[in-house]
Image: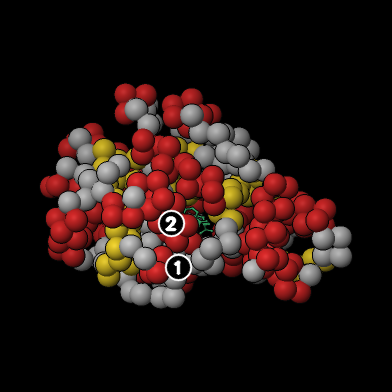
């Protein structure tokens, strides 16, 4: 990666990704973009462009203007928001991705597109979900993720476009708030722990999902995009995970650092149904073997860092 365009850059991942890329690749080599401006630390320095991924000409113009060689395509709607407007989700997640891939084909670019644990469904093996297995998701978000994985592989096989991706679990961070996913409870719980010392979980006790702290999620993008292409057997998309827990386990982790913290439940059946259709834990051995994936944070080290960071703020 030499000249990088990030779409959806003011979102949960983009905010921390852009700051890290500017440090590692140079401020002049990173172009952040999003469909509109919102308050963000990303806008304080460096390049920023308004870019709607459903407009192919806008993507092409920006790629040519900055001589881009890699697009990190984060523009998307997430699971809960998308389920409320499937048509809009398809337009952004699928037509947007198609536009990015077409521009990449014409300009010889590499493309990173995140998939998700949502690419799996109720028929998928629930524990240690294999890299290659049944993918029959029941949300429009999951359908777009499976279709996106296939489309990215197609562009690699048919046109030689260097497409790579990971299946992210729920991501926990303290930069930008999450954008309307099912796993967002695992972020909100830390904010509420600092503010109120208590949290009401909309996800039920016993519901395990894979999770990851944002510094590891960002390492994954950089490591995978810089990996030796000849070592990649898979491309779109690699299972990656750092931990798997249910609400009780994250509560107990917080109580290790904040003994007075309390949690109760008010389960939201809409998001619970989505969570129930996803795996409990992924097998990420292909990512470990093919490009050296090795996350640094477990649940307790993430909890300590989240509480320290939010507490100071
Ligand atoms: P987010 O919702 O926080 O950010 C997405 C960004 O896309 C927003 O800033 C939004 O303004 C922008 N956007 C929306 N429509 C657009 C358009 N038409 N053109 C350009 N930008 C547009 O999402 P995120 O959490 O940063 O996720 C980024 C990617 O990672 C998505 O593909 C998502 O599915 C995937 N992912 C995220 C998680 C997670 O837990 N955050 C987990 C798995 C996969
Ligand atoms: N965190 C995401 C969501 O819940 C998973 O892709 O939608």
Q: Secondary structure at mark 1?
A: helix
Identify the residue at image location x=66%, y=50%.
302
Which label sits on residue 200? Answer: none
Sequence-wise first label, 1 or 2: 2
* Quadrant of res 88: bottom left
Identify the residue at image location x=23%, y=34%.
157
Q: Is residue 200 visible?
A: no
Quadrant assignment for the C terminus = bottom right
Disc 1 and disc 2 in contact, CB within 8 angstroms: yes
In the displayed structure image, the side of residue 102 where residue 212 appears, left or right: right
Q: Which residue is mark 2?
A: 19
* Quadrant of res 187: bottom right
Task: Say which of 96 and 52 sits in front.
Answer: 52
Quadrant assignment for the N terminus = top left
Q: Secondary structure at mark 2?
A: helix
Q: Which residue is mark 1?
A: 41
Whether label 2 lies within 8 Å of ligand 1 gets the answer: no
Percent position of residue 145, x then y: 40, 51
Percent position of residue 115, x then y: 42, 48
Task: Say which of 44 and 240 sits in front.
Answer: 44
In the displayed structure image, the side of residue 207 where residue 119 appears, left or right: left
In the displayed structure image, the side of residue 53 where residue 193 appears, left or right: right
Q: Is residue 18 visible?
A: yes
Task: Say which of 94 and 243 sits in front.
Answer: 243
Height in image: 229 above or below 35? Answer: above
Identify the residue at image location x=50%, y=51%.
118
């Amino acid at each position: 990666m030499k000249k990088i365009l990030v779409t959806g850059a003011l979102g949960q991942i983009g905010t921390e990704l852009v700051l890290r890329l500017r440090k590692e690749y140079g401020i002049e080599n990173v172009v952040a973009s999003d469909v509109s401006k919102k308050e963000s630390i990303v806008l304080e320095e460096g390049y920023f462009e308004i870019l709607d991924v459903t407009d192919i000409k806008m993507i092409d113009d920006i790629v040519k203007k900055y001589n881009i060689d890699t697009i990190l395509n984060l523009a998307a709607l997430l699971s809960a928001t998308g389920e409320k407007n499937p048509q809009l989700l398809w337009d952004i997640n699928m037509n947007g991705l198609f536009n990015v891939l077409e521009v990449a084909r014409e300009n010889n670019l590499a493309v990173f597109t995140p998939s998700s644990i949502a690419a799996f469904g109720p028929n998928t093996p629930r524990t240690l979900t294999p890299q290659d297995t049944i993918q029959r998701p029941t949300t429009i978000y999951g359908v777009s993720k499976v279709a996106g994985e296939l489309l990215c592989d197609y562009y690699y096989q048919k046109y030689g476009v260097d497409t790579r991706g990971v299946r992210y679990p729920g991501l926990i961070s303290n930069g930008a708030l999450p954008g309307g996913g099912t796993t967002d409870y695992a972020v909100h719980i830390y904010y509420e722990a600092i503010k109120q010392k208590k949290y009401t979980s909309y996800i039920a006790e016993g519901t395990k999902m894979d999770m990851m702290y944002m510094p590891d999620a960002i390492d994954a993008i950089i490591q995978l995009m810089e990996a030796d292409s000849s070592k990649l057997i898979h491309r779109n998309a690699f299972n990656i995970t750092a931990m798997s827990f249910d609400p009780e386990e994250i509560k107990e982790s917080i109580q290790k650092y904040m003994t007075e913290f309390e949690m109760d439940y008010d389960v939201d059946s809409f998001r619970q149904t989505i969570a129930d259709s996803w795996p409990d834990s992924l097998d990420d051995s292909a990512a470990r073997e093919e490009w050296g994936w090795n996350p640094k944070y477990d649940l307790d080290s993430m909890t300590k860092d989240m509480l320290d960071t939010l507490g100071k703020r």
